[in-house]
Each structure stands twice: as C-alpha cells, then as structure tokens.
Image (cartoon, rainbow, N blue to C red):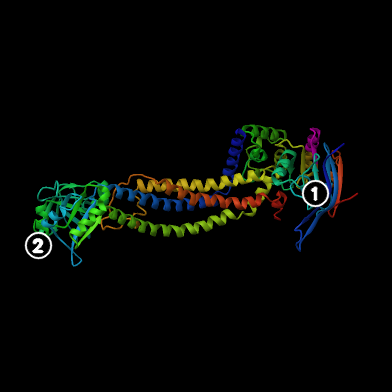
C-alpha cells in the first residue's frame, strides 16, 4: 500500500510539472472548461433553488382556489356563492379574497392590490412588496398615489415593506384596508375576486375540488399542486432555453477538448516514448495521463461549481437572472437558500469530468502500448 | 564466460509489408558477456541504433529470439518487458532525450517514479549520482540550461538511478569534443569496474580503439561482420 501511495504521489508530481510545462495551452482549456461548468452549474443551482423556494412558499397557500367565470370571462363571487360552496362536504373553511391588478404608468409595472381578510392594514395605509418599494423608491411613512377606478388620485401611506425573503410571491403586492380596496376599485363590499378553500383531508383534495366545481359549474378550480406544476414548467422552460444555449457552447468545447485530449502531439508521443524507454511501464503512463485528465477536468469542475455557488447564492445570480426569472415586470430580488440536489451534481460531474478523462486515456493507451523505440523515432 | 544477452536469428523490418519497408537488421546472431564494454561499430545506416534498441528491449524483433540472463524476452507481453527493461537496462541516448522544463535532479529521478520508492529516497540517490558525475552544483538547474557535456552526465545519472546491470549508450561521443569523449570513456570504465555491462554504438575510431573497450562488433547493412 505504501509503495502504491509513493507511486501515485510521484506520478501526480510529474503530471503537475507536465501541465505546468504546457501552461498556456492547459490554462486556456481550464478557463473555458470552468466557464462551461459555471454556466451549467449556475443554471442548475438557480432553478433548483427557485423550485425549492416556490415549493416552500406554496406549502402555506390554499389547497384549492376558485375563480368564477361568466362567458369565459372572470366574474366576481358573491357572498351567497361563498355560503353555498362552504357547504360542500370536505371543505373546512372558505375565504373570499379581494384583489385586482393595477398598471402603474410611473413605474411601468403591474401591482397586485389586495384586501386581506385577516389583519389588514389600517385605513389609508398600505403594506407593499419590496419590488413595489424598489420601483417607486418607497420606504415606511412615504406616500403612494394611484389613480383609482373613479379617476381621482388615491393617496396611501406605506406602513410596512415586506422583506426580500417573501419576494418570490410578494414582490408586486400592495395590501390595503378592505374599505380602501372597495373605494379604489369602485366595487361593493360583498363581492370577491376569488375564493380560497381549506380541505379537511389532504388525500381528498381532488375529490373535494371536483365537488366544488360541480356546485359552481361556471367556475375555474385551481389546485395548489397545479400551481406548483405551473411554476415548475415555467422554470423548466426558461432553464431549457439557457441549457440549450449552454449546450451549444458545451458542444464547441467538447470538440476542442476531444481534439486536445484525443490527439497526442509529436512532443507528447516522444515524451511517452522516453518515459517508457527509461523504465516506465504502460500502467504508469496511463496513470499519469489519467491524473492529467482528472486534474484538468476535476479542477475545472470544482472551480466552475464553486464560482457558480458564489454567483447564485452570494451575488444573486446576476448574470443569468434576466433569462431565468422574467415572469413579472417587477423582478423579485430575494436571497436564495443554498441547496444542492445530489443527483444534479452527480450528473453534471459525470457529464463533464468523465468524458474528458476517458478522452485523454484512449490516445495515451495507444501510445503506451507502442514500442518506445518507435515512439522516439516517430515511426509509429 | 556465459552470455548475458543473446540474439539468435534476429531480423528487424520497419514498415513491414509496405512499399517503404526497410530491413534494419538481418538474421543477427550475437552473444554479449557480462561485465564488459562492447562497442557496436559501423557506418550510418548500418543498424547500430536498431540493434541497441533490440538488445535493450526498446524494440521487438520482427523475427528471431532475444534472451536476457537466460530468459527469452522477445515474446514477453509489454507489461513484463517494461519490468525487464527497468530492472536490467539504463539508457544514454545520442540526443540525451532529457525532459525539458525539469531540473537535472528530477530528470534523474524519473525512471524510479513507478518503482514505489519514496521521493526522498530517490532524490537522495539522484543527488549522489549527480555528485559522483561532478554536477552537485547543478542539481536544481533546468536541463536546457546545461551544456552538452553536462546534459550527457545527467543522462548517465538517469541511466543509473535504478541500478541497472547493463548500460546502453547510443553514439555517446557524437556530440562531444575529444576531452569530453575521453572523460566519458573514463566514466564507462568506472561502471564496468562496478560490475556493470556496457554496450554502446559508435562510428568514432577513437572510441573503438580506446583501451577501455573490451570488444568491438562490426555491423554493415544490418548484418554482423565475421
């Protein structure tokens, strides 16, 4: 065992010196390799973390939502509708929600104006998401003027700005008192934009949703799991675009790497010939080449992945964020929790490290089994 | 005296079966005794270097048989042949074939890397050999900074790091002046006195006629002259 360790340590030593001797070429390869891993890993880490955030946030959202439709157009629910739906077997609670979209021409952004059923802000005050605060430069105590449905300016005082952690769902949110909301949208107090349901038995959510739909046939019923799927498919689609772009770059790199790794230069062949002539066996040559491939690809993988980690979790994924999160005009700015999916990591590792290492071994093996005399003469 | 290396009916053809096939050695029978300095003499293209390669297991004969210390090695698989090469032979090439960008000491240490010995053990032995050859002050110098004579001594030290029984040198004095050639022959005599066998090729008459040389084998057109 000791002899094996000595042997490996000396072969690694030689490999490092060989890499240093062709420093410029290897450094270029290392930088490109790390760059590709960086893009792939950034995309992977960012979308994985976003999916996780969405999952955690939606865990507290209602299991079933209902929107009333009239001739396929969104219509308001009445208090009678809610009472009727609350009687559906399996529903433990139904809550009418009041919200509406508002386009703010000053910021060029859409806000979601909502009157919460529980713990609303005081009259004349609002709680805003950090996206709204950023877009309008608002802090607690500032005023926000919005043009109401009646045409007049509605002046509201900011009572609270939501933290960045809730930004994924609250970036564009403006919470206001129900009376303010009714006055702003010019709507009566007994209409609701949609209804949120709590279901007794989580196993029965689909059945209860079906019964709710039957009770109000002209309504659209949305399950939490469908929302999650929508988020997931949105991220998958955007991730796909970026991965496709990265894939083109990766393919170009693969050709470069294959060319470099699979074809030994005359100098490299001569060097292998010398090493064999002075006492190295085929196994030692292959081990040395394996270390070379592993050091370049493994090193580039480690550097690229660590850079991606810092980029995504400490620099807010500044380079890829415009591509990956564009579903809102107000881009949420929030801190992602570092998380790595082991399968994704392993897949990325296998797709980047293994092919390169193998590509270095094949030509080295061909060279190593040739007579050293031929290698040195260049007659192989 | 029994033969350390024996060749029987050895033929070596390069590019066999192709239009540019070249017969480098033709039906060579040769026996070389241990503990002697043997010179292969002949003009350019006579097959000296090829014969050295076959003797030192760097190349396999196209046909014929090679025995080293009584063991037939010409048909051994590469892994075993490499082991025989490492244990038995040390090579000093005409162009030295040192690895550029590395120090003299590292070049000397290289043949011992796959043996499993420790770095410090190999480094100590390399420093010892370089010291014996008068290069103690140049151990850390990169080999491309050294003169031709110094590079050759580094190549000799490298040939000796695994303590081989046979040292093979291909045209060792071709790039040296008279004084350095004489010095080199002195080093070879020392190796023989340590009990090693020395086989070298040369077309230099001063080498073939040197007092330290025990035997001269003449080659012409790939054949050993009687």
Near-viewer residue (B133 or A119): A119
Q: Are marks 1 and 2 on the same chain?
A: no
Q: Is residue A43 left or right of residue A23?
A: left
The answer to if A102 sits in the magenta stretch is no
- The crowd level at tag 1 (other Cα within 10 Å; few <14, some 14-19, many 20+) is many
Q: CA distance from mark 1 to mark 2?
A: 105 Å
Near-viewer residue (A248 or A26): A248
Magenta residue span: B185-198
Q: Secondary structure at mark 2?
A: loop
Near-viewer residue (A79 or B108): A79
The quarter of the image holding the C terminus of chain A is bottom right
Residue B187 in the image: above or below residue A203:
above
Q: Residue B51, which numbered label?
A: 1
The quarter of the image holding the N terminus of chain A is top right
Q: Is residue A271 left or right of residue A203?
A: right
Counting from the top left corner in percent of width and height, residue B72 is at 79, 43
Q: Residue A150, which numbered label?
A: 2
Subunit under mark 2: A
Residue drawn at x 60%, y 55% as measured from the top left? A263
How many discs appear? 2
- Is any part of residue A106 visible from this angle? no
């Amino acid at each position: 065992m000791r002899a094996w360790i000595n042997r490996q340590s000396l072969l690694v030593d030689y490999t490092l010196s060989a890499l240093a001797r062709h420093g410029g070429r290897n450094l270029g390869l290392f930088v490109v390799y790390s760059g590709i891993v960086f893009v792939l890993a950034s995309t992977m880490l960012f979308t994985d973390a976003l999916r996780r955030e969405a999952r955690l946030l939606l865990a507290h959202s209602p299991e079933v939502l209902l929107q009333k439709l009239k001739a396929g157009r969104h219509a308001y629910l009445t208090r009678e509708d809610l009472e009727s739906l609350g009687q559906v077997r399996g529903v433990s609670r139904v809550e009418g929600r009041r919200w509406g979209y508002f386009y703010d021409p000053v910021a060029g952004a859409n806000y979601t104006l909502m009157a919460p059923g529980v713990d609303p802000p005081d009259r004349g005050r609002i709680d805003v998401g950090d996206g709204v605060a950023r877009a309008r430069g608002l802090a607690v105590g500032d005023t926000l003027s919005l043009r109401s449905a009646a045409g007049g300016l509605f002046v509201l005082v900011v009572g609270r700005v939501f933290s960045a952690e809730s930004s994924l769902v609250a970036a564009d949110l403006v919470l206001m008192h129900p009376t303010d909301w009714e006055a702003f949208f010019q709507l009566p107090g007994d209409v609701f934009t949609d209804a949120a349901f709590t279901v007794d038995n989580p196993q029965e959510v689909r059945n209860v949703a079906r019964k709710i739909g039957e009770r109000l046939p002209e309504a659209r019923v949305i399950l939490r799991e469908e929302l999650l799927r929508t988020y997931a498919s949105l991220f998958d689609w955007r991730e796909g675009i970026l991965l496709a772009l990265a894939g083109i770059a990766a393919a170009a790199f693969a050709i470069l790497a294959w060319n470099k790794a699979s074809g030994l230069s005359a100098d490299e062949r001569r060097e292998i010939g010398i090493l064999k002539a002075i006492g190295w066996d085929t196994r030692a040559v292959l081990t040395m080449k394996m270390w070379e491939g592993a050091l370049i690809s493994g090193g580039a993988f480690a550097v690229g992945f660590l850079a991606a980690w810092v980029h995504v979790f400490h620099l807010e994924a500044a380079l890829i964020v415009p591509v990956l999160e564009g579903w809102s005009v107000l881009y949420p700015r929030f801190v992602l929790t570092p998380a790595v999916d082991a399968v994704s990591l392993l897949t990325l590792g296998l797709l980047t490290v293994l092919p390169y290492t193998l590509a270095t071994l094949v030509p080295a093996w061909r060279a190593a089994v040739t007579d050293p005399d031929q290698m040195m003469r260049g007659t192989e | 005296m029994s033969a350390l290396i024996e060749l029987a009916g050895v033929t070596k053809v390069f590019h066999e079966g192709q239009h540019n096939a070249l017969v480098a050695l033709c039906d060579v029978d040769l026996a070389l005794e241990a503990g002697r300095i043997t010179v292969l003499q002949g003009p350019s293209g006579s097959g000296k270097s090829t014969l050295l390669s076959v003797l030192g297991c760097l190349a396999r004969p196209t046909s014929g048989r090679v025995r080293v210390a009584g063991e037939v090695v010409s048909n051994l698989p590469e892994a075993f042949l490499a082991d025989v090469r490492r244990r038995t032979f040390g090579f000093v090439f005409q162009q030295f074939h040192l690895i550029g960008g590395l120090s003299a000491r590292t070049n000397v240490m290289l043949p011992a890397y796959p043996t499993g010995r420790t770095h410090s053990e190999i480094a100590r032995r390399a420093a010892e050999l370089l010291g014996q050859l008068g290069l103690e002050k140049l151990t850390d110098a990169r080999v491309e900074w050294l003169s031709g004579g110094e590079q050759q001594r580094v190549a000799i030290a490298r040939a000796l790091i695994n303590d081989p029984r046979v040292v093979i040198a291909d045209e060792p004095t071709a790039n040296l002046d008279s004084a350095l050639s004489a010095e080199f022959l002195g080093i070879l005599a020392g190796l023989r006195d340590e009990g090693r066998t020395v086989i070298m090729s040369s077309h230099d008459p001063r080498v073939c006629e040197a007092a330290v040389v025990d035997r001269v084998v003449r080659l012409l057109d790939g054949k050993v002259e009687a």
